Amino acid sequence: MRVLERRFVQDFIRMANDGYEQGWHERNGGNLSYRLTDHEVDSVKDRLLDHGEWHPIGASVPGLAGEYFLVTGTGKYFRNIIMDPEACIALIELDDAGENYRIRWGLVDGGLPTSELPTHLLNHEVKKRVTNGKHRIIYHAHTTNVIALSFVLPLNDEIFTRELWEMATECPVVFPEGVGVIPWMVPGGKEIGIETSKMMEKYNAVIWAHHGMFCSGETFDLTFGLMHTIEKSAEILVKVMSMAPRKLQTITPDNFRDLAVGFNISLPERFLYEKKD
Ligand code: 13P
Ligand code: ZN
């Protein structure tokens, strides 16, 4: 079976296209990476190139030594992935120090993995450790409404989480641990990757102010679903804030406490603060 026909490659392509259709990937905006299972690596190994040169990752990820990732290419448009996946995405292998990578498949017209590779891999390294290897996907999207909110809400985890939770009853069930927010930073490097991966120790979603969002998850469905839920909630909040200076009614801290009991989840009290009018 060709690499392209493998289920994980097909699922990757579908998710990228779903994100494009949501309007989150103008031009080359956003990037996606998937950490292969050992079984998936074995299933494609005899179809891979063996002569690619090693390139520095730009960050050190010893916890991912020897792992393989499917990643989007830098400058490639999500819009084109479904039409020409072999030109837009790549399968990369990390060396046994977790310092360098080489391309083993894809990017047939040339190119390199996403410029956000340091952030993706630093996040993967944290998530592999804290989820016992369960999380395999890191997804970055330019989610319009989340970006809009980063201009009007304080850049604070508690406030963003609480405001997003209030907009849809399912939110605290989907992301009970909350969302992290980091202030504007220069993208595409190790520094923003380190700050994001620190947040990934406790959150599955991290907002980059005035830029977009990163989500982590176990499956393509869960990761896309998390991005979709947060962005939908942000859209409702943008509408509410555009309609009236204040809400007439909302989901209260005690409502959230009741929800936590009903759904058997724990909602940290730091998000359930009393608001001053
Ligand atoms: P790449 O094209 O390098 O993936 O960059 C897109 C992006 O969203 C940068 O944050
Ligand atoms: Zn971006």
Image (cartoon, rainbow, N blue to C red):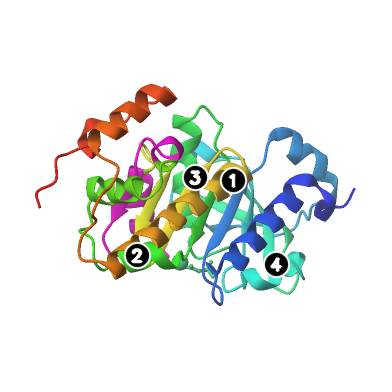
Question: Which of marks 2 and 4 precedes in the sequence?
Answer: 4
Dot 2 falls on a residue whose secondary structure is helix
Q: Amino acid at mark 1?
A: Asp
In the rendered image, which quarter is residue 31 located in?
Answer: bottom right
Dot 4 falls on a residue whose secondary structure is helix
Q: Amino acid at mark 3?
A: Ser
Q: In the rendered view, tell whether residue 267 sits above or below residue 124.
A: above
Residue 269 at what x, y percent from top left?
22, 31
Q: Residues within 10 Å of mark 2 (few under 14, many from 20)?
A: some
Rounded to the nearest angstrom, the CA distance separating label 1 from label 3 is 23 Å
Residue 210 at what x, y percent from top left?
33, 68
Question: Measuring 66% from the left and 63% from the top, which residue is drawn there?
Answer: 17
Q: Identify the residue position indicated by label 4 in the image.
A: 81
Please tell me whether mark 2 or mark 1 is closer to you in this view: 2
Q: In the rendered view, tell whether residue 27 sits above or below residue 195.
A: below
Please tell me whether mark 4 or mark 2 is closer to you in this view: 2
For the magenta stretch, what is the residue range?
172-199
Q: Identify the residue position indicated by label 1 in the image.
A: 95
Residue 232 at what x, y percent from top left?
46, 56
Please tell me whether mark 4 or mark 1 is closer to you in this view: 4
Along the line of sight, which residue is nearer the eye, 95 or 107? 107
For this orientation, the residue located farthest to the left is 276
Along the line of sight, which residue is nearer the eye, 95 or 5? 5
Question: Measuring 38% from the left and 35% from the top, which residue is drawn there?
Answer: 176
In the rendered image, which quarter is residue 219 located in?
Answer: top right
Q: Amino acid at mark 2?
A: Val
Q: Identify the residue position indicated by label 3 in the image.
A: 216
Q: Identify the residue position indicated by label 2 in the image.
A: 238
Dot 3 falls on a residue whose secondary structure is strand
Rounded to the nearest angstrom, the CA distance separating label 2 from label 1 is 45 Å
